[in-house]
Amino acid sequence: MEKDLLGLGEPDLRSRFRGCLLGGAAGDALGAAIEFQGRAEILKRFGSGGIRSYAPAYGLPCAITDDTQMTLFTAEGLIRGLMRYRDSGLIEYPAVTAWAYQRWLLTQGQHNLFDLDPLHPDAGWLYGVEALHSPRGPGNTCLSALRNTHVPGEPAMNDSKGCGGVMRVAPAGLFADSPQEAFDLGCEFSALTHGHPTGWLAGGALAAMVTALRDGGDMSDALDVALDCLSERMDADETINALDKAADLAATDTPYDEAIARLGGGWIAEEALAIAVYCALVATDFHEALVIAVNHDGDSDSTGAITGNLLGVQWGLEAIPAELLEPLELRDVITQVADDLLDCVDWQPDDAVLQRYPAF
């Protein structure tokens, strides 16, 4: 649905950046309590409409999961990568972001097997957020790949295409100058933990869509952009077919739950992306889109998070209802990261900046 039909007007860039990260966190948190439950169990627990508001998870009334945690560290990697470029002239976004993921690994109580020390000489401010130091259902592939990282920035040596490579890369789309650059960054970041081509091509496709939406396109435009990027790459058939199927289903009157069941469970990359794209294409309301995105048999928090990323950047912060924003865990931290990701293009690596975002 076009933004003017929602009565929201055209969001500015700050609204889009905040909307993308906070919208993703809202979808993540809505799905957190039911991530490992089937649809029948969800309906039995919450009624015929499924879960519609936050439910307790991880001992909190409204908890984010590893999806949002890793998204924040992706954004940190991009900002620190830019500061590294301005400080030394080196363009090393995958390597710097890989170090950010090593800091996230520490917050989950795990350690790199090759004694990498991502806290030396300075951990930066995000690692110091105490609430991030809490395991929130981290994916086994992400944990294993990061534990076994020997040279940060090199692709993972596995054959996984789990959705953990996709759900965290929206910041690349906000940061990039063009959809093609976003696609390349998304692929590189996803490949740090997921070695199957679909595992990282789906990440590239999401990042490209976020850039297209950031620049004022609608979901149909964004989907076309992603498909164009994918058409130039080998091994993209799985991702292309999943996105085509999502678009085809969105053009029908198939019931939402049936359509999502046809797209899969969302545990693997192309399915999670396809479910989110379907939800964003059929959405007329942000809250309802998240409800559609999480009430299924699969990876509810990830499909909710990706849907929130897409609609948040398209419609802006104003589209997210207060009942989803106000109780959201780490709302202020997420807002600050979104603002920093937008504002960092105007920063120079002075002492104050480097204390928050060291250039490595």
Image: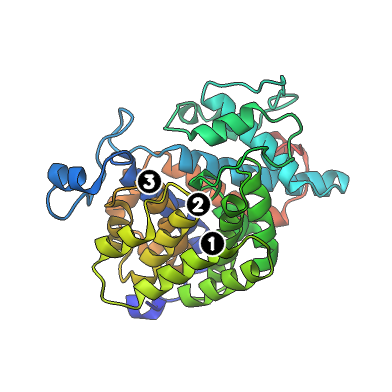
Q: Amino acid at mark 2?
A: Ala
Q: CA distance from mark 2 to mark 1?
A: 8 Å
N-terminal of the two: label 2 or label 1? 1
Label 2, on which residue? 269
Label 1, on which residue? 239
Q: Quadrant of the N terminus?
A: bottom left
N-terminal of the two: label 1 or label 3? 1
- Residue 57 drawn at (x, y percent): 30, 34
Residue at the spot 65% in from the left edge and 61% down from the top edge: 183
Determine crowd level at label 1: few under 14, some 14-19, many 20+ residues with C-alpha closer than 10 A.
many
Q: CA distance from mark 1 to mark 3?
A: 18 Å
**Residue sitting nearer the eye, 153 or 344:** 153
Label 3, on which residue? 299
Side of 101 relative to 284 (left or right): right
- Residue 113 drawn at (x, y percent): 67, 20
Q: Amino acid at mark 1?
A: Thr
Q: Amino acid at mark 3?
A: Asp
**Residue sitting nearer the eye, 22 or 187:** 187
Residue at the spot 35% in from the left edge and 44% down from the top edge: 29
